[in-house]
Image (spheres, grey):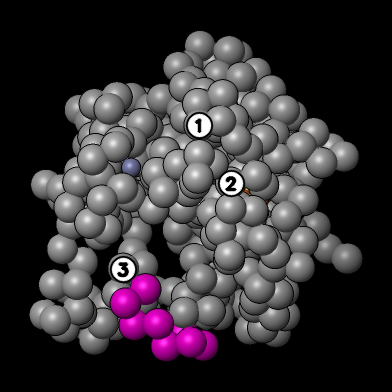
């Protein structure tokens, strides 16, 4: 088998990206990855250098790679880690917290840590059991809690923008699921940037939304980032994983399929095909949670406060 060479310097390549018809050596890959991140930040007008970014980190490769590349690019980026109290055999939460703390200490970066059990009295699996939907799988309650806590931390910490490390594989799996069920309201809100609004939602951005998971993994590996390799024990058997496997098989036969599915979706959105009708937009009119001050569609406590308060009933 012939050696694959870097397109830029003709040295031996460490990665070949069939979807981009591009092979690069270590140094040129790291350079390309930083340039692409910068390009996506500018293309989707995610944030400026003068703005403070809060990066949601889980201890996994994508979120630590995102924090690392933003730091390398010279952005003012702090980290935010939520200990969900999911321990299992691998001590998932403890280990992932340790990875984030180690990462921040090595680079002298600022990391905020919230321990959900200490702050709200119960870990995610316990909170989930208080809801009908959460009894089987805690993911819906976990997702809601993370969104709530991230937005609140960014708002209270005076950050301009909240960055998450969703990659193309994540985005395409969500897009696929929403399309299968024609969830037009969710499709209309799936985007690389969700703008802030006066009701208290911070701008949310996904700088990695056009990188394949394989590309973010290569970046983490080549930068020597230590991350937690175990997945959350509750991810096993999820629909999201099943969609990813199916999409991987399609990508294998048709390189670039995921990227074109996602980019064509964004283009279609820009042409206005998923704009919510005025009546649907009105249904999202927001109020303020009397308990925590977060925006909510509820009259009274927000969905997160309702779950936390359920303990006292
Ligand atoms: Fe939370 Fe489910 Fe993700 Fe685990 S797999 S971190 S429970 S959303
Ligand atoms: Zn090279
Ligand atoms: Zn609340």
Residue drawn at 13 percent across, 72 percent down: 282
Mark 1 Cα within 10 Å, few/some/many (few <14, many 20+)? some
Element on which disc 1 rests: helix
Label 3 and label 1: CA atoms lie apart by 29 Å
**Residues in magenta?**
179-186
User: Residue 270 appears at what percent x and percent y?
Assistant: 22, 76
Q: Which mark is residue 120?
A: 1
First in sequence: mark 3 vs mark 1: 1
Query: Are discs 3 and 2 less than 8 Å apart at CB?
Result: no
Label 3 and label 2: CA atoms lie apart by 27 Å
First in sequence: mark 2 vs mark 1: 1
Q: Which mark is residue 189?
A: 3
State whether residue 106 is above or below residue 28. above
In the image, taking residue 215 as reference, residue 293 lies left or right, namely left
Ligand 3 within 8 Å of disc 1? The answer is: no
The residue that disc 2 covers is 127
User: Residue 304 appears at what percent x and percent y?
Assistant: 42, 47
Q: Quadrant of residue 225?
A: top right
Label 2 and label 1: CA atoms lie apart by 9 Å
Residue drawn at 15 percent across, 48 percent down: 199
């Amino acid at each position: 088998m012939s050696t694959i060479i870097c397109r830029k310097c003709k040295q031996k390549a460490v990665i070949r990206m069939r979807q981009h018809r591009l092979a690069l050596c270590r140094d040129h890959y790291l350079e390309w990855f930083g340039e692409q991140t910068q390009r996506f930040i500018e293309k989707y007008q995610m944030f400026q250098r003068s703005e403070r970014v809060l990066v949601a980190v889980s201890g996994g490769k994508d979120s630590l790679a995102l924090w690392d590349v933003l730091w390398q690019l010279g952005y003012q980026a702090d980290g935010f880690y939520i200990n969900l109290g999911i321990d299992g055999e691998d001590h998932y939460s403890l280990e992932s917290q340790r990875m984030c703390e180690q990462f921040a200490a090595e680079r002298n970066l600022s990391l905020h840590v919230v321990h959900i059990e200490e702050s709200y009295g119960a870990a995610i699996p316990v909170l989930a059991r208080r809801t009908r939907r959460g009894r089987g799988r805690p993911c819906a309650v976990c997702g809601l809690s993370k969104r709530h806590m991230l937005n609140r931390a960014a708002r209270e910490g005076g950050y301009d923008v909240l960055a998450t490390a969703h990659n193309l594989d994540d985005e395409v799996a969500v897009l696929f699921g929403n399309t299968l069920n024609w969830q037009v309201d969710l499709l209309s809100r799936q985007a690389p940037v969700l703008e802030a609004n006066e009701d208290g939602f911070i701008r949310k951005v996904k700088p990695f939304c056009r990188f394949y998971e394989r590309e973010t993994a290569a970046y983490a590996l080549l930068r020597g980032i230590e991350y937690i390799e175990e997945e959350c024990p509750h991810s096993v058997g999820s629909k999201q994983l099943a969609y990813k496997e199916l999409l991987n098989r399609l990508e294998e036969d048709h390189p670039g399929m995921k990227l074109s599915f996602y980019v064509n979706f964004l283009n279609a959105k820009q042409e206005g095909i998923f704009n919510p009708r005025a009546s649907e937009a009105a249904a999202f009119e927001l109020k303020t949670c009397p308990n925590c001050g977060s925006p909510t569609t509820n009259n009274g406590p927000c969905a997160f406060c309702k779950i936390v308060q359920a303990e006292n009933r």
